[in-house]
Amino acid sequence: MVKKLSPALKGSKSKKSKSFPKKSKSATKKSKSASKKSKSTSKKGKSTSKKGTRGNKSVKTASPIVASSPLPPSPSSSVVVTQTSAATDKGGVKRQRLLQKGRGVVDPFSGKADSCHVYENGEDLYQCTLNQTNISSNNNKYYILQLLEPDHGGPYYVFTRWGRVGISGQNKTECFSNVQDAVRSYCKKFYEKTRNCWSNRANFKKVEGQYYLMDIDYGAEEVEKKDSAQVKKKKKMEKKEVVESALPKELQYLMRLIGNKDNMTQTMRELDINTDQMPLGKISKPQILRAYEVLKGLEKELKKPRPKLEEMSGQFYTLIPHVFGNRKPPVIDSMSMLRKKMEMLETLGELEIAATLLETNETEGMHPLDSAYKSLNCEIRPLPQSDPAFKRIVEYASNTQGLTHNSYTLEVTNVFTVKREGEEKRFKSFKKLGNRQMLWHGSRVTNFMGILSQGLRIAPPEAPSTGYMFGKGIYLADVCSKSANYCYPAKDTKTGLMLLCEAALGKQEELYSAQYMEKPVSGKNATKGVGRMYPDPAGAEVVDGILWPKGKLIVNDEIKTHLIYPEHIIYDVGQCTLRYLVMVKFCYK
């Protein structure tokens, strides 16, 4: 029996840390044999971290303690150990503003960011971030190691900081009178923690029970570069009168939405990612791909004994540091959890692209929003609400809200036309396949800098097949709310972004249950997952040879399928081109 559904939406007409003891006056012991430089170093160390946070209350930390290193230090060295505040990444800790000199960023907890820089010797930069997660032992910890050279002469320092991921932890500073001793100490510590030689770290191999070398730049969200060409350029721009944006108001709002770094960082935190160890845009693509490979291995192990799952979950959390507080890191022991981690990696990849674009494309004499727009290499124009296409899009969205997607309605607030450079030329050769349809695709707002600059992409070979019902491809829908569920709108604005893509589907293989494939079946050009709730073909409209399946939803209970709503899958990125970017407001009931 076929039943018609009434539309469910309308378009708009407009528009826990420890409590440390109080500071002890006798907490610092001075060595009689220490040099004057060492004494002054210890005194400076006392003030590196005096306050932590516990909720909204200020908590005093223990004063620095001069301690002995595990082995007797050489006459040229002294050691200072400091307990820093134990506030978590999600606990509202004030973000440290970091100072970058050369290629390195001095850890702010060293207290030497103003007087030292990270030591460089040729291509070698003596700083690293190590990570280790062992679920069975409830280990989820990091270790930061830096060799610091004074800016204007003086002793060298080997600084280390360690603790549970998301907590500032403890730190230790060793002082050396010459660089040779400092380098030896640095290399020794690196070997002790990793069982790898610093000089051979390009061939780093993870040793069981030891730390893993993170492939990221050390830093945080805000890095102030000193004496760099980029900063000089920025200061020069700031001296000039503020340049007004040349973009239309609607486009300015869009660029603020998709280019907001705070929103990107917040997205990472919502995914439990530690943004101190793995700052926005600092994780490398190879490390993300290695994390995909771990998930691929987990996929094979899901039906095997738990210890292996535990071990491989630890490998994933080691590559992608998560904040779990004092909780034991959860084992990735289900397909649904695996899918969530895959979505996380996809988001990380998009954020990496966005951060790179925003950092490297500032143009002198141009408003930041205009620079961000220019970096997309994509023509985006507001579509007037009087345009027939705008009204068609509102109707398409209104008619195709799924009956099961009843926690919200959607309001179309803005529509933009999109033309990506080179995409039309690429798509031209696929038009001859026929069966061209205008279909939906939804994603997080923070993913759109990456999507608009690079187009829709297919998951890499390293990614597991789980989560892709019909294999790795680009998934499109003719039911608006099906795609809207992937938007994860911002909590404050409740705004989401969706794409309408023209897809050349050609001959489609119709399937009623999951079937994994890397390419269409022989003789077909795409796959269609048949759903029992779909747009009424009688309400479809053909415009310039493109089918808009915008009829009101109907239900056919006689179809024996595992899918509620249809899905259309293409396996070649050239088979679709972006046509419209649709801004919607989620009106929750």
Image (tube, grey):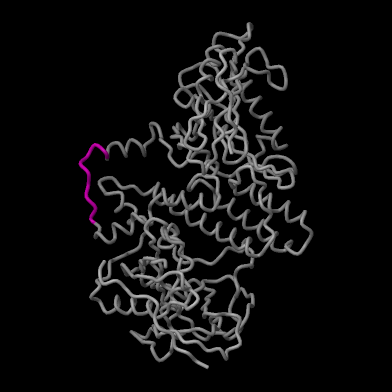
Q: Position of residue 296 (x, y in %)?
A: 67, 61
Question: Is residue 416 visible in the rendered structure shown here?
Answer: no
Q: Hey, which residue is sitting farthest left in the picture?
A: 241
Question: Left of 104 or right of it: where is 177?
Answer: right
In what quadrant of the picture does the C terminus appear? bottom left
Q: Is residue 342 above or below residue 528?
A: above
Q: Is residue 203 above or below residue 549?
A: above
Question: Left of 140 or right of it: where is 305?
Answer: right
Question: Is residue 47 visible in the rendered structure shown here?
Answer: yes
**Residue at x-position 59% and y-position 21%:** 179
Q: Hey, which residue is sitting farthest top in the picture?
A: 32
Nearest to the observer: residue 579 or residue 440: 440
Q: Position of residue 101 (x, y in %)?
A: 45, 31
Question: Left of 385 or right of it: where is 146?
Answer: right
Q: Position of residue 155 (x, y in %)?
A: 55, 17
Q: Is residue 50 above or below residue 35?
A: below
Q: How many marks?
A: 0
Q: Position of residue 510 (x, y in %)?
A: 57, 85
Give the quadrant of residue 224. Answer: top left
Q: Is residue 585 above or below residue 526?
A: above
**Residue at x-position 59% and y-position 58%:** 341
Q: Hey, which residue is sitting farthest bottom in the picture?
A: 1
**Residue at x-position 36% and y-position 60%:** 377
Nearest to the observer: residue 401 or residue 71: 401
Q: Which residues are the magenta region? A: 238-246
Magenta-span inclusion, residue 9: no
Please name the predominant secondary structure of the magenta segment in the image.
loop
Give the quadrant of residue 513. Answer: bottom right
Give the quadrant of residue 127. Answer: top right
